[in-house]
Image (cartoon, grey):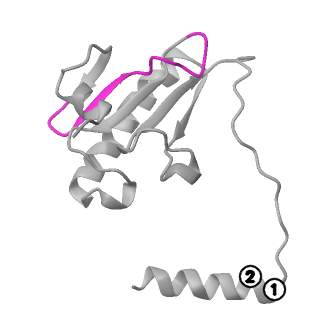
Amino acid sequence: MDCIFCKIAKGEIDHNRVYEDEHTVAFLDVNPAVHQGGHTLVIPKKHYELITDVPEEELGALLSTVKRVSKALMKFGHGVNVVQNNGKVAGQVVPHIHFHVIPRFEGDEVKFCYWDVHKLDKEKMDEVHEKIKSLLNE
């Protein structure tokens, strides 16, 4: 497999690792969202593409590391954003699940995609509600 994040997890590519445990690795993003740095990526050591692919136990370990890194970066900056994309259409560039933990600073000018809100009529809202409930029960 030619996955850059798998190579980083194995130590085959030089990177700034800030944390590691049995299941996860956290390292600085080489293209941080903020000029102050600290933008950290958290990945599982095993290769999974999407959040839906990760077994529950490993997902728990992954989220525990995200929380640990977030806590540190809250002290480094003034706040954090945690971002996780699934699939190309959602902005996932590297097909290995990863969480961006981005420290935020007053006036950092980081902009995330903000969306226009849409009003759905009751009929459409009910239709969507029932569809999602049925999908959750599959």
Instruction: Give percent across and percent down for residue 35.
Output: 61, 11
Q: Residue at x 32, y 37 (%)?
A: 43
Quadrant placement of the N terminus: top left
Of the numbered discs in the image, which one, if any, rests on residue 35? Answer: none
Q: Amino acid under label 1?
A: Lys
Mark 2 lies on residue? 125
Rendered position, 113 above or below 123: above
Say if mark 2 contacts mark 1, CB within 8 Å.
yes
How many numbered discs, if any?
Answer: 2
Magenta residues?
Answer: 21-36
Q: Amino acid under label 2?
A: Met
Query: What predominant SS class does the magenta segment belong to?
Result: loop
| Residue 137 as seen in the image, left or right of residue 106 | left
| Residue 58 as seen in the image, left or right of residue 91 | left
Quadrant placement of the C terminus: bottom left
Q: Is residue 27 magenta?
A: yes
Instruction: Give percent across and percent down for residue 60.
Output: 29, 51
Mark 1 lies on residue? 122
| Residue 133 as seen in the image, left or right of residue 61 | right
Asked where in the image residue 107 lies, by quadrant, the reply is top right
Q: Is residue 137 magenta?
A: no
